[in-house]
Amino acid sequence: MLMSNILFVVAGLLLGVAFQGGMFFFLIPVAGVAVALGYMNLPRIPGGKTSAIPVVTRAMRATGLAPAVTPDLRNSVKDDSTEYNEPNSTLKVNQVWARANADVNKAMTDLLQGLKRVIPNANSLLIFSNLGSFKEWGIRVYSAESSSQIATDVKITETSGLLGQLFNMDVERLLEGDLSGGKALLYYIDNPSIKSLVAVPILDQNKNRMGALVVDSLYPNAFSQSTAQAMTNIASTLYVLYYKSFVSAKNYIGQHQFSILYSYQHKFFQTMSVKDIYRQIFDYVKQNIPFDRMMLLALDRAEDDPHKEREGRVVCCDGIDSEQFANKKFSLSDKGLAVLALFQNRPVERFFSSSSSQYVPRIDNHETRNMDFRQLFVMPVATDNNAGQAELAICLESRTSGRYTEHEMQLLKAFAGVAGFAYARASQYETKKDQATRDGMTGLLNKRSMPEALRTEKIRADRRKYNIGVLMMDIDHFKSVNDTYGHEVGDIVIIEIAKTLLREVRKDIDIVARYGGEEMVVGLVDTTPEGMIETAERIRKAVLQLEFDVHKPDPLRVSISIGAFLVTPDYKDNMMKAVSLADQALYKAKEGGRNQVIQYTESV
């Protein structure tokens, strides 16, 4: 026999002796301790065998001594609406609460069975618990002579006849010994002729009435004042059992959730990529937080100009209307709630009424408007808690009002602290990497890092069987520009042409490098012969459109010459050889009159 069962039997025997009255009355607290120890020896929530979770539909008669399932340990009723994202962790949390409820029901049922055996003439014993508020109770468990007579879906309120008196703060107990005519009790279906009843409230530490312990009898004057006092002591023990179970389940869930957070901390420190940090934040929220829409906002890297307003974009988005927000750009002057959280480095929470016709922007006034959302919560992710503004923000929205409680907010706050530190570390690493691999004036890859970038892309191209177009370009008559207008103007020309290249190619896909002086190299990933020449011509024409103010009546205009070479999957030489072949084509373009594109062939 399990130790818990032995302790419950001992508690029952002690109560049986205590109900004899007199000097044995002191055994009631000892019995309460035995019950508490018995519960503590039940298999714990994280593992082991737990009692079966009974399912009883409303208005359905219970059978045997199975607990009646209506109240919940959390005193809450789950909303029936289904959210866009129902993470696996939510299911696990619900399972923990279900197990905790089942274990509490089992312990309370065992206690009632023991009391029924030792209280003379007891007909039915019931424990009521609140149904989401202190103003409404339902049957949690019971033990009865005829279980088919118990209405398991009954609700007790302050207007529910005799038992409704227990909601009155002045009523400490009910002791009836001569219910005239067998006064009807709501928890019975067939209204047996009950003559006696003892009922005491179950009080929490603040004296709120969380439910009641009830015993009745078919015999008149079946219970004494001693019985009522014993029931009061047992009700106090029941609250301890109830509260300890709640705390145990809540702590277990908290430990589980923070163990997940700890695992993400390890993931964060195994990566040095800002993009990977974005993905890990998205994955964590997706796996652990319910939402109908989630957005991750990120500010672009700060520029050297302190007067220029910072901009950003939505780097990740999932859920309702996500396609409308993905990669959406914004500035810190936009008035959306999510942008506000970034700008002020403060969490933002808003509730929206179903009757309101006024829409509050999340990003800006041009976004898609959806009036179905009832709650928004934005948690900024700052690299420094004392910073004036955050670098990232997690924006969660739900169609259920009150979906995000203090628990979710604190969990996200802890996660944001870890994510912010990891983001700062990755950003600093990428900045130093850029300083080592990029040209300080243009921001393009430098000559030292370009060969490795081309080599890496060639390995990927060989595996996936696509072409790489190599463009070598040079500014026509650039020495004359420097001699005539000075090196400062020459630097401006180089910078603006570099910006033009980045606009005309795929910034996050193609390779753009400053090869030296006024020479630049572009690697076009996964292109065709026609696509390579088309892009080269587009770049050439875009440079022709540039105008540079040199404080003369006419602005300065420049042109470029471009040599092109197509690297196919069967190309076996290294990529610097391909750059050299493109350079040979560039030389022919210069010889042929400049401001043109020449593709390398064997005859060039």
Image (cartoon, rainbow, N blue to C red):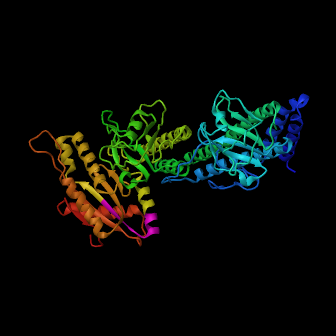
Q: Residue furthest left?
A: 553
* Image x and y of residue 500, in percent: 26, 51
Find residue 302 and report its image quarter: top left
Q: Which residues are magenta?
A: 458-471
Is residue 545 found left or right of 270 in the rendered image?
A: left
Q: Residue furthest front?
A: 181
Find residue 254 and report its image quarter: top right
* Image x and y of residue 503, in percent: 29, 53
Against 519, residue 360 (above or below) is above
Find residue 239 and report its image quarter: top right
Instruction: Judge whether residue 91 is colored magenta.
Output: no
Query: In this orientation, which residue lies closer to the viewer: 365 or 521?
Result: 365
Query: In this orientation, which residue lies closer to the viewer: 33 or 94?
Result: 33
Residue in the image at 38% along x and 39% along y: 337
* Image x and y of residue 181, in percent: 72, 42
From where the camera sits, is residue 440 visible? Answer: no
Is residue 106 found left or right of 119 in the rendered image?
A: left
Against 267, residue 14 (above or below) is above
From where the camera sits, is residue 594 visible? Answer: yes
Is residue 245 found left or right of 367 in the rendered image?
A: right
| Quadrant in which the C terminus is drawn | bottom left
Number of numbered discs present? 0
* Image x and y of residue 502, in percent: 31, 52
Query: In this orientation, which residue lies closer to the viewer: 404 or 134?
Result: 134
